[in-house]
Amino acid sequence: MKKKILAIVLIAGLVLMYGCGSSKTDKKSTSSKAKTQTEESQNSSSSSSSSDNSSTAESGENDPGDAGNNDPTAETAKNNTEQQMEDKYVGSWEQEGLLMSDGSIDDSDGSTGSLTVNSDGTYSMTIKDADGNTTDTSGKWTINSDKKLVVGDYKMGIDDNGYLLRDSGQRDGKGFHLYYAMKKK
Amino acid sequence: MITVWDGCRIDSERSVLLMIDMEKAFVEPGAALCIAGAKATVPSCMRAVKWARACGIPVIWVKRIYAADGSNMEKPRWEALQKAGWKDVLTPDSTGLNSIEEPDGLVRDPGEQVMIKPRYSSFFGTDLHDQLQEKGIDTVLMAGTTTPNCIRTTCYDALSYDYNAVVLEACCSSRSEQVQRANMEDMEMVGAVILHGEAPTVE
């Protein structure tokens, strides 16, 4: 009788032990599976995010750091700046003389010059050099990356006093380059 | 009158041409102190002198005359002359190749000033600066020999006195091309204007 009771207790114990062990294995398996699913989800999310970024970068849309790229007002501002630059040059210019290093104008060499810069992109220029030789040129004018007016072989900028400066190819006794100064009429 | 040489505007009323040490003893081949490249510059010097005259630019012939006791020359030069045993070189009585006369092909007008300098620089121990100030000169044109010594020291002193220093390259000479080039570059670096080529033709 005692043996029967002991056998039943043992069997019951084994059954309980099996039951608990099985439950633990399932939990572990579920946990592992859940973890795997989380990683996949994150990867998927990351991939999606990366893809979104790429898409944003390519389109240039909704990127606060690059707001001006597709800003129509920026294009307008750029056009306005170019227009202002062109307006500075368009008009009739008359040579006053050689701009010396001390700021004075020397017209003693007898050279003269006139330049007409038209708003349609064309120009005409007449230069008489110190020896009395006259040269007439005409064609298309442009503005280069230094914002200087390009007319034939000349690249001319405007100084603080409003003079359009044409290189004379001369220098003074101190080595300063000298420019013919033209004033807008 | 404004004239342009190598793009440089020169006001003849405010300029002077110094023809420095163009003497037979420095220039003529076979002379005691001959500078290798000096003789070849004589035609360019003559052309520059004629151009200056035509423009109304005064020419001053700056020269060395050595005292027999060496009292008016640099000590190293005096010692070198002593060591070489050279006598009657650039003395007032020197004749022929070692004289103070202009080399053949270079002609001084009798009315043009001669200034004797006791050292390399035309300004040292002379009244050149006072003379130029009196005449309202602000630009000193330099020609002659040798570039590293008398031209260069005159150039630096001219700059120190706030003159426009203008060096006529074709009219200057050195003992070698390298020395000539290096000295021209140095002078240009410190603010001198180097004029290349020959003097312009003046009608």
Image: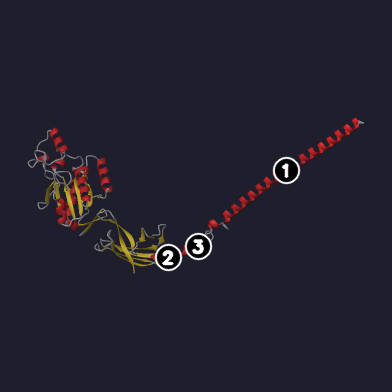
Q: Amino acid at mark 3?
A: Glu
* Tag 3 subunit: A
The Cα–Cα distance between marks 1 and 2, rounded to whole angstroms, is: 70 Å
Q: Earlier in the sequence, mark 1 or mark 3?
A: 1
Residue ID for mark 3: A75
Q: Earlier in the sequence, mark 1 or mark 2?
A: 1
Residue ID for mark 2: A84
Q: Amino acid at mark 2?
A: Gln
Apparent side of residue B87 relative to residue A124 in the rendered image (left or right): left
Task: Identify the residue at the far front of this view.
Answer: A2
Give the image location of residue A139, x and y in percent: 39, 63
Query: Which residue is drawn at the image coordinates 25% and 47% (left, top)?
Result: B187
The Cα–Cα distance between marks 3 and 2, rounded to whole angstroms, is: 14 Å
Dot 3: within a 10 Å radius of its alpha carbon, few (fewer than 14), some, or many (20 or more) residues? few
Dot 1: within a 10 Å radius of its alpha carbon, few (fewer than 14), some, or many (20 or more) residues? few
User: Which quarter of the image is occupied by the N terminus of chain B?
Assistant: bottom left
Q: Earlier in the sequence, mark 3 or mark 2?
A: 3
Q: Give the structural element (helix, strand or loop) at label 1.
A: helix
Discs 1/2, front: 1
Q: Give the structural element (helix, strand or loop) at label 3.
A: helix
Viewer-nearest residue: B57 or B137: B137
Query: Which residue is drawn at the image coordinates 49% and 64% (left, top)?
Result: A76
Give the image location of residue A19, x and y in percent: 81, 39
Task: Identify the residue at the far bottom of this view.
Answer: A185
Q: Amino acid at mark 1?
A: Ser
Residue ID for mark 1: A31
